[in-house]
Amino acid sequence: MRLTDIVQHADLALWPQIAMVLFMFAFVLVGLRVVLTSREQDRAMARAAIEDDVPAKPASATATATATQDAEAAHISHEITATKERDHG
């Protein structure tokens, strides 16, 4: 059996159809993201692209993340201090 026989009998029309379905799926997802994104989020993302001091996340998410990081840092600092006191005392 030669390669030309294999190609002639292969159903090659299926691959462009699969590609079209995948493209349409991605297109719909991007369209939904555009439609469902609020103006506030659009403006925040636009400001973040040109200003260094504007957080990309909403202020509440940034504050929560900062508070969590501060608590973790305090806990680690306390553990280090306790370990040093135990080792030297």
Image: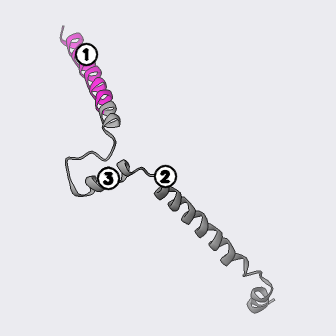
- How many neighbours does mark 3 have within 10 angstroms: few (below 14), some (14-19), or many (20 or more)? few
The answer for how far apart the CA atoms under marks 1 and 3 are is 48 Å
Q: How many numbered circles does the render carry? A: 3
Q: Is residue 76 magenta?
A: yes
In the picture of the structure, the residue carrying the numbered disc 3 is 43
Q: Where is residue 83 in the image (x, y as percent from the top left)?
A: 25, 16
Depth check, mark 2 against mark 1: the one in front is 2
Q: Point out the stretch of residues depicted in magenta.
A: 66-89
Residue 24 left/right relative to 68: right
Residue 11 left/right relative to 43: right
Of callouts 1 and 3, the N-terminal one? 3
- How many neighbours does mark 1 have within 10 angstroms: few (below 14), some (14-19), or many (20 or more)? few
Whether 65 is drawn above or below 37: the answer is above
Pointers 3 and 2 in contact (C-beta within 8 Å): no
Of callouts 3 and 2, the N-terminal one? 2
Q: Main secondary structure of the magenta part?
A: helix
Residue 84 in which image quadrant: top left
Q: Which mark is residue 36?
A: 2
Q: Under tag 1, what secondary structure?
A: helix
Q: Does the magenta stretch include residue 78?
A: yes
Q: Position of residue 4 (x, y in %)?
A: 75, 92
The answer for how far apart the CA atoms under marks 2 and 1 are is 51 Å
Q: Residue 12 carries which label?
A: none
In the picture of the structure, the residue carrying the numbered disc 1 is 83
Residue drawn at (78%, 89%), measured in percent from left and top?
8
